[in-house]
Image (spheres, rainbow, N blue to C red):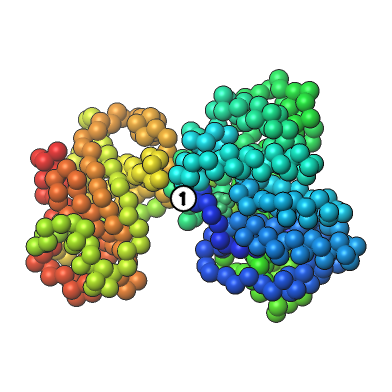
Amino acid sequence: MLSEKSWRISLTQRCNYKCFFCHEEGSVMSKERTVIDEDVLYEMILEGIQNGFEQFNFTGGEPLYEKKIIISLLKKLAAEGKTPEITIGTNGTMIDDLLLDAMKAYPGKIKFNCSMHAVDEETYLKIISLSQKGIFNHVVGHIQRAVEIEIPVKLNFVLLKGINNSKEYIQKIFDFAIEKRVQTLKFLELLITDKLIYLYDYYYEVDSIAAMFPDDLYLISNEIKRNVYRYKDTDLIIELQKCPCKMGCNTCQQVAGRMLTSDGYYFPCFTLVNNAIKLDQYTQKEAFAKGDQLIKTMGRRYKNGSPLIIQKIQHIKKKKEYYYEVNSTDQNFESWCGVLKNKGANLVMKRTFKEIYFKPQMPNEDWDKNQMIFKVYQNTYNGYKHNHVLAFNKLIEEGGHIYTEVTYLTEKEDARIDDYEEFVKKTFEKKMEITMECNWEINFFEYKGVPFSVGEHLESGMWTLLCEQPFNSEELLGLKSSNVKTNLISFLEKLKLKN
Ligand code: SF4
Ligand code: SF4
């Protein structure tokens, strides 16, 4: 059994922010949850205290949606003479005097962990994906109020490459903390689960901050998952916390706390959301022992790595992609997509894509014979550009269909790269040249378990359908096969001509 440290209790999955990198506590929060009965939650906490837990962190979503429960729990704990350390992890919008009074009256240690991520309104709004002017100052006001009445505040900043990671911006954060008399800053690494792989571009190591300020940060403690520094000769403490999964599943048992949700589930691992353990079927000790077994299995499997994509693992994967040009009588791409939806296809997501095609300046015979295509996809999400999968496509004709055999060359499937031209140069000794750039509006659908996408080529107005299995007019939405051409080469030629 782990040496018990802390519990994170997610009180709700609701949040009034939409931070673009939100991992929703490892994706477990996306499903609708009922909030546990307050008395049951209180009993769970008492059992936790009995089992040696000394810290309880209330998280969400935004836990202050359940402010009443928090206030009531604080009162009950105090009345029973139980004073575990309490941390409220909040975005700060809903802090009010009622809560501050209850925190002030709590006899044990209690503090806020407030997610800031930015110290100017423009960046802040961009991160939280809202346009509510004034909300930044509103939150800053709440932080100042807490500091005034001596409730400790730690400000959390997820380090985001290109957004808040420059030396100038980090300096601004230090200055902000000192001006607002905040005690602690914590910089965290982005947690990239498989559902958030498009965030790879923003990943930046927290250790880089120590490297940026070698003369200003004095190391005062050094733990497995974080290094703690003092800033110059001030009282400001800076924590640089690595993503726990980066250190590998082998280490997880030593560094991770217990993660519970308010509807009574224990999640031993961020990535295994289906392995949650319902606490009403076991005692906490039994549930945690089961969780430890699961983490050990992860440790045996991944050793010093983990399934998260920040691991540097060479990833080469092949898959088939069948392309079709679609002729439809519809005049408008969106209305045609509407027809697909009416026929029962589920729209999964929409993306704007750019494809950049390369070929060697001096293609060899193999290249020509196999009709190789080399390309980079670039998509736009939330206003940010993502360069991603680099792939070799080899054209193959089989049974009346033409498909591309795709070989991914990045460190991990769907891993992102910063500078694709540089990457291309580094990856291949032969010089590559860009032969074509295409912009696409893509709608991703799923129909009877078969994923497929339809795209509009914005330069030419052509529509295409892409599927990982041969398109079958009977199985897929009853589209007539005469509406579909299976000729990718002529399709690419057409794109070239129209570019
Ligand atoms: S405030 Fe926290 S829970 Fe809410 S969207 Fe942002 S990261 Fe997610
Ligand atoms: S078991 Fe591995 S993947 Fe799961 S939380 Fe721990 S380190 Fe991360």
Q: Residue at x 35, y 71 (%)?
A: 449
Q: From the viewer's perspective, is residue 465 above or below residue 420? A: below
Quarter location, residue 38? bottom right
Q: Residue at x 78, y 23 (%)?
A: 233
Return the residue nearer the eye: 324 or 402: 324
Residue 236 % position (x, y): 75, 31
Residue 189 seen in the figure:
no
Query: Horizontal placement of 476 versus 198: left or right?
Result: left
Q: Residue at x 60, y 69 (%)?
A: 275
Residue 98 % position (x, y): 73, 55
Residue 60 % position (x, y): 62, 58
Residue 146 % position (x, y): 73, 43
Q: Residues within 10 Å of mark 1 (few under 14, many from 20)?
A: some
Residue 171 seen in the figure:
yes
Return the residue nearer the eye: 188 or 494: 188
Label 1's element?
helix
**How many numbered tags mark residues here?**
1
Single out the residue that lies furthest toward the right: 81
Is the residue at mark 1 in contact range of ligand 2, meaning its CB lies under 8 Å from it? no
What residue is shown with label 1? Answer: 197
Return the residue nearer the eye: 29 or 244: 29
Q: Residue at x 65, y 30 (%)?
A: 176
Q: From the viewer's perspective, is residue 178 above or below residue 269? A: above
| Three-letter code, disc 1 | Ile
